[in-house]
Image (cartoon, rainbow, N blue to C red):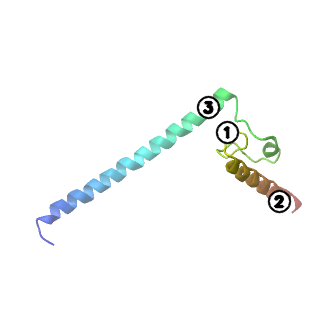
Amino acid sequence: MDIDQIPTAVKWIGSVLIAGFIAQFGKMLAEYLIKRYRERRVRTTGGAAQDTAAVSHGIESTGPLAPGKGATLADEAKARKKLLKAEAKARKKGLK
């Protein structure tokens, strides 16, 4: 390695470290803003709308795949399967 290339390599390493540092704080800021938006949305709607079967079993089904939220047919089928699986798990857990 040539001595002239060392400062260039150090500059690149420094640039990458600084970019990673900025990206980490950008990620944290984005997560904070999303959390704040969701909390505000829950407050304005008076709570999240949940499926009655999910509520009775303590399962939250308000995600993007929740049935009846404008999801596609495949997404609704996936959400229904997930809900049925969670209900079966809750019944199995109740038998023990």
Q: Which residue is mark 3?
A: 41
Q: Toward the viewer: 69 or 96? A: 69
Q: Secondary structure at mark 3?
A: helix
Task: Tell me the CA gap for discs 2 and 1.
Answer: 32 Å
Q: Earlier in the sequence, mark 2 or mark 3?
A: 3
Q: Quadrant of residue 96?
A: bottom right
Q: Is residue 30 above or below residue 81?
A: above
Q: Is disc 1 surrounded by few (<14), some (14 to 19) or many (20+) residues within 10 Å?
A: few
Q: Earlier in the sequence, mark 1 or mark 3?
A: 3
Q: Is residue 34 above or below residue 91?
A: above
Q: Secondary structure at mark 1?
A: loop
> What x and y, as percent, mark residue 55?
79, 43
* Numbered label attached to residue 92: none
Q: Amino acid at mark 2?
A: Lys
Q: From the viewer's perspective, tell me whether residue 33 is left or right of residue 70.
A: left
Q: Earlier in the sequence, mark 2 or mark 1?
A: 1
Q: Residue at x 50, y 43 (%)?
A: 31
Task: Tell me the CA gap for discs 2 and 3.
Answer: 33 Å
Q: Amino acid at mark 3?
A: Arg
Q: Which residue is mark 2?
A: 93
> What x and y, as percent, mark residue 37?
56, 34
Q: Which residue is mark 1?
A: 70
Task: Tell me the CA gap for discs 1 and 3.
Answer: 18 Å
Q: From the viewer's perspective, tell me whether residue 65 is left or right of residue 87.
A: left
Q: From the viewer's perspective, tell me whether residue 7 is left or right of residue 16.
A: left
> What x and y, as percent, mark residue 56?
83, 44
Q: Quadrant of residue 8?
A: bottom left
Is there CB contact under 8 Å for labels 2 and 3?
no
Q: Is disc 2 surrounded by few (<14), some (14 to 19) or many (20+) residues within 10 Å?
A: few
